[in-house]
Amino acid sequence: MDPSPLGLVTGPPLIEGVKTKALRVLPDERGWLMEILRADDEGLFVRFGQVYVSATYPGVVKAWHYHQRQVDTFACVAGMIKLVLVDTRESSPTNGKINEFFIGAKNPLLVQVPNLVYHGWKCIGPETALVVNVPTAPYNYDVPDEFRLAPHGALPYDWSRKDG
């Protein structure tokens, strides 16, 4: 996938409603800075719900779930993950489509997952991956907007490494 002049990523067709943005790392002698999501990111910023970091140990799969209302916006800021999206929406023009994104330190990319699309990830590097999410709504502890499936066998996706 190649970044466009606007920072949006082009490549294989995306699931309907999925958006991406190439992230810039700005290094200097003190370290580096990476902007993830800005309020003026037209077409990407919806609204602020909360921000959280999820740590995933090497080889671990955190999947599957979707949200009825919430939109998730992910960036992996340490390590590497394979983020996978599966469109099971019956009325979607991309129903049945699967998207894979290899994101993290070696490929800084923002991926926005629309509601009703199953998603999950696997840490594919040798170190713990840190994933930042900026969802459009805060987590509701009493009535979570989260619908889960088992990580293996519930959807037509194999988390095994693909050698070749």
Image (cartoon, rainbow, N blue to C red):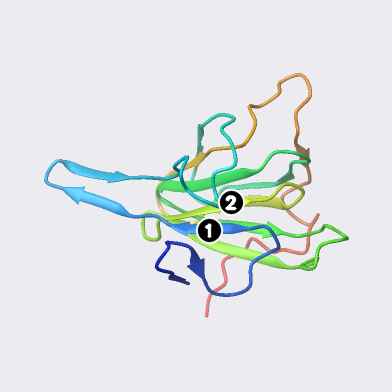
Q: Residue at x 40, y 50 (%)?
A: 79
Give me the disc on residue 20: 1
Please provide percent x and percent y for residue 60. Answer: 57, 47
Distance (Cα) linking label 2 and label 1: 6 Å
User: Quick one: 127 or 64, which is closer to the camera?
Assistant: 64
Please provide percent x and percent y for residue 74. Answer: 53, 46
Image: 38 above or below 119: above
Q: Quadrant of residue 99?
A: bottom right
Answer yes or no: do the residues labelled 2 and 1 have beta carbons within 8 Å? yes
Q: Secondary structure at mark 1?
A: strand
Q: Please name the residue that numbered disc 2 is placed on.
A: 112
Q: Quadrant of residue 93?
A: bottom right
User: Quick one: 124 or 91, which is closer to the camera?
Assistant: 91
Q: Amino acid at mark 2?
A: Gln
User: Quick one: 122 or 5, which is closer to the camera?
Assistant: 5
Please provide percent x and percent y for residue 131. Answer: 49, 43
Q: Residue at x 36, y 45 (%)?
A: 35
